Every structure is written in C-alpha cells, then in structure tokens.
Image (spheres, rainbow, N blue to C red):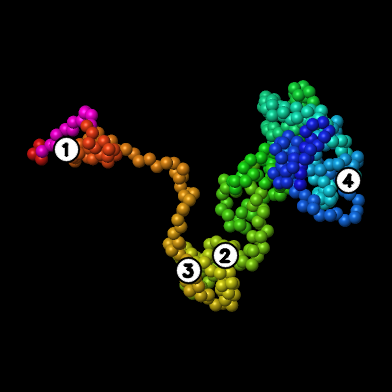
Amino acid sequence: MSCGCNTSGDSTHSCATKSTTGCSNVDTCGNSYKLNVFDWLSTVKAPQQSKCPMVEVRFKNDRKSYYHNVNQLPLHLGSVVTVESNPGHDIGVVSLTGELVRIQMKKKNFNEELAPKIYRISSQKDIEIWQEVRKKEESVKIQARKIAKNLHLEMKITDVEYQGDGAKATFYYTAEGRVDFRQLIKEYASAFKTKIDMKQIGYRQESAKVGGIGSCGRELCCSTWLTDFRSVNTNAARYQQLSINPLKLAGQCGKLKCCLNFELDSYVDALNDFPSSNTVLDTEKGRAFCIKIDVFKRKMWFAYVENSMAWYDIDVADVKKMISMNKKGKKATPLEDLKSFALDDKPVTVDLIQENNLDRFEKKRNKQRNKGNFQQNNNKTPNNSSENQQNTAEKRNPEQKDQKKPFKHKKKFPPKRKNNE
C-alpha cells in the first residue's frame, strides 16, 4: 500500500513504500503524524453499493475530522487536501478512505449532513503557505507564554496550531480554574495579527499533544492510538493487586496511567471466581486471614492470626471447601496439611543481568596501593621490598631481565625499632 505525497505543483507521486512506517517525507506524508490508521478493508472487495463519499482528514497532532468529497477527487492515503474552514480554508492530510470511514463515522455518531467539503488537492502555493505558518508555531508559543505570564494568568499554553491559510491560530491551554481572556486576546491579536481562538484541554490531552516515552519504553498510548480518555481510579490498581504507589501508577500527565484500564476487565472476570479477600478461615490450629491473591496461579495466601510471618498458599478450590466446612460449623484442616510456603523457604533468585544493581554500567577499577605509605610497609624490611619490586618488574618485561636497569632513587624507610626501645 503506497502513500502519495504532493511535492511539486498539483502532481502526486507514490513513495513506493509497502510498510507501515511510511515514507521519509515528514511534512506531507500521512504516516508521519500521530494516530495512524491501518485500513484493514483495503484488500476486501466492497459489495455492490455506492462508494463512500466521505474521507477522514488528519491535521496537526491528534485532530481529525470527516469531509465530503463532493468533486469525486482521486484521493488516497497521504494526499494533501484543502478543506473548508471558518474562516478561510485549512490544509490536512488524508488518513482514511473507503468503507472504513463509514464505520468510523457510525462509531463516533458523526452526522454526514453536517460534514464540510473538500475544495481541491492542495497546490504548491497552498503547501508553501502551510509550511511557513507551521514554522512560526514554536516561536509564537514561547511569546504567548510570556504575554500570559506578564498578565499574571494562572494558565499554561501547551500548543499553538495555525490554520492552513494562516487566518486563524488556535491556542491550547491547561488551567485549574476559570481564566479571564479579555485582555489576553487583545494582546495576542495585536502581537500575532490573526484571529485568536482559545481552547482549554485536560492534562491527558496535553500529554497526547506533546508526546513522549512511557515507563514501558514505548511511545505514549495517548499520542499514538488512544483517542478516548476514560476515567482511571485506584480501584483498578487494587483489582490487579498493585501497590498503591503514586510515583509508579502516575503517568507523564500526572494522572493515573490509562493502561491500568486495559486488563481491568480480565482481572474482574477472573476475581469473580475467587472468594473475598476478607475471608477468615477457622482451622484446627486457629483462625487464618487472607494476605494476598495470585490471579494467575489461582491461589490465595493465608496466615495465622497468632503467627502472621508464615504464609501458606492454597488453591482456590481448597479454600472454597474450607469455607463450606466453616459454614457447616466444622473446623477446617490446618494450613500446613494442604500446602505450606514459608517466607524463609523462598527459592534463591540469581540476578543474571544485574538489573537491580545501580553500578552495573560502571567499570570496576582496582585501586593501586600506595607503596610509599609507611603504615602498609611497617612490617616489611627494605631488602624484601626491593626484591618484590625487582620480581614484579621482571614479570612485566621478561625480555629486559638481562639488561642493565637505570639507577633509581630508592626511598629510605626508617629503621625497625628494637623491642627494648
């Protein structure tokens, strides 16, 4: 599947890349943007029906919209198009065509009648103006932050997006409360000479626009494929038996990580077959309470009230039997008879890659001994020390053994004191 890029005039060319990474043209190729879409219906023949006239167009970062191809232009993935906007026109990159667009519109409840139009395939002049205003966005963002700081407004300008024709600039900002923009918009309009549009976003949307690398080593989900931001609470971490540590559970946005919801449904379904974590067993050796639950091994760890240092792992089926015996008024079998696993008997693990060692990347250097230190050579005689130096020199250079050695000044050690002194 090739991606077309409009590089000169109105003509388009094929990058001849059949991989998902796209071509090297970062400015115009659709695959260089975030939130890439794979058309899994591209090789499937559509039934005999009217071709979908809608096209998905992607703009800077994570902004997408659907447009009506009224002129039946030959569009494909990566085509740079000029679309209807208010005011003027905007320029975007086609990210999806065909029947999959109809499915996406139905999923997002997008009204086809309200869709704006696609004017034309962007000309070289349109692309040059678009690239010029895109280059100004970083400097405008820095200047906008200075103006907001001088006005003492409690807000942060996260990103600036110019329209394709430069007639409008959208300022994305984050703030804890309400912000008075009356004086700010006047300052921006006089400084940037364009129409100003202010749009407040959340901290998750800010991370999606800025991007970055997560603790897993991959790009942030919100900046690559995640479009809906569901609320995440600490119950998701408790269901997955994770420690409630804000430093580990929080993402780069400062909120709880979105990936805590990815496997939550699987954990909830698996925990439906487990007894409650507040279960207390009445055994012949005393009462035992639940310490933790292992979802993957389907085991529950119990410890006696009198001796909480010894833990015992028991299968879920055995726990259910013990609970049924307690309901009948009978005491259950001691935990030792089922299966025991004390904390002191844990298997010894060997860290082969030394991932827990902080000094694993540092070279270990042998510290040279100071031979002139009197405290180290207090018990050595001068003759023995000179013989040792001669032997070490012969071992280092055996060829120079018979050669005459140059005279070197020897350090004089103080004479060894007698016992009477």
- At label 1, counting other C-alpha atoms closer than 10 Å, the crowd grade (few under 14, some 14-19, many 20 or more) is few
Quote the CA–CA distance across marks 2 and 3.
15 Å
Residue located at (75% from left, 30% from top):
131
Q: Is residue 80 visible?
A: no
Labels 1 & 2 near each other (Cβ < 8 A) = no
Which tag, 3 or 4, sits closer to the chain's start? 4
- At label 2, counting other C-alpha atoms closer than 10 Å, the crowd grade (few under 14, some 14-19, many 20 or more) is few
According to the image, label 1 marks what residue? 383
Q: Secondary structure at mark 4?
A: loop
Which mark, by number, is residue 118?
none
Quote the CA–CA distance across marks 1 and 2.
70 Å
Q: Is residue 408 magenta?
A: yes
Position of 138 relative to 70 (above/below): above
Which mark, by number, is residue 53?
4
Magenta residues, start to end: 405-418
Q: Nearer the viewer, residue 169 or 283?
A: 169
Residue 271 in the image: state x and y as whole percent: 63, 63
Mark 3 or 1: in front is 1
For residue 6, which quarter of the picture?
A: top right
According to the image, label 3 marks what residue? 340
Q: Amino acid at mark 3?
A: Ser
According to the image, label 2 marks what residue? 297
- At label 3, counting other C-alpha atoms closer than 10 Å, the crowd grade (few under 14, some 14-19, many 20 or more) is some
